[in-house]
Image: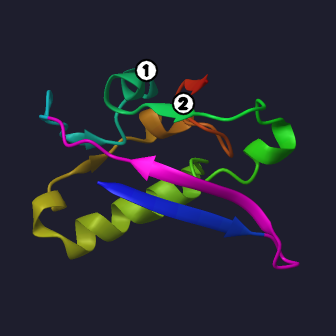
Amino acid sequence: MLSNFLIRGASGRKKISANVIAFESPVAKIYHALPPPIEELDEVLAIMLVGTVRPNDYARKYTPFLVRRKKITLALKWLKENNIVYKDLEISAENLKAYPENDIPVTVKYM
């Protein structure tokens, strides 16, 4: 799957414009508790940024890959309540504690 995204600031000016490529991959492991341990995320998720300059901390604040624990918890609760496949899912508070409050949870490669 290939898609484009564009993030605009409050002033309407373009902040980030990029392409996203997602490859289907076989499921190596079935989880009975989510989110998975943060140590295992690099096995299933990769982020590679390509550009002429390395993004600074200010630019990283606007990346669409940021993780917020509260949002993950709300999304998992919604899945349990609204999708029969996730009905028996355990939401791991221990795994959630290891996720960043407002950062990218995996290694980011710069090219």
Label 1 near label 2: C-beta < 8 Å? yes
In front: 5, or 68? Answer: 5
Residue shown at the point (61%, 48%) measured from the top left: 66
Residue shown at the point (33%, 46%) measured from the top left: 22
Check the image and report above or below for 81 versus 36.
below
Q: In this rendering, would 5 be left or right of 29?
A: right
Amino acid carrying mark 1 in the image:
Glu
In front: 87, or 47? Answer: 47
Residue 45, how many percent across, how many down?
Answer: 38, 33
| Pointer 1 residue | 39
Check the image and report above or below for 78 versus 27.
below
Whether residue 81 is in magenta: the answer is no
Check the image and report above or below for 72 versus 46.
below
Label 2: how many residues lie within 10 Å, few (<14), some (14-19) or many (20+)? few
Q: Read off the magenta span.
A: 9-25
Q: Nearer the viewer, mark 2 or mark 1?
A: 1
Question: Helix or strand or loop: what does disc 1 sit on?
Answer: helix
Question: Which dot marks residue 98?
Answer: 2
Residue shown at the point (53%, 60%) measured from the top left: 71
Q: In this rendering, would 24 be left or right of 69?
A: left
- How far separated are the C-alphas under marks 2 and 1? 9 Å
Position of the N terminus, as image quadrant, is bottom left
Label 1: how many residues lie within 10 Å, few (<14), some (14-19) or many (20+)? few
Position of the C terminus, as image quadrant, is top right
Whether residue 19 is in magenta: the answer is yes
Residue 102, how many percent across, how many down?
Answer: 68, 46
Residue 59, how many percent across, how many down?
Answer: 79, 46
In primary-sequence order, the first of circles 2 and 1 is: 1
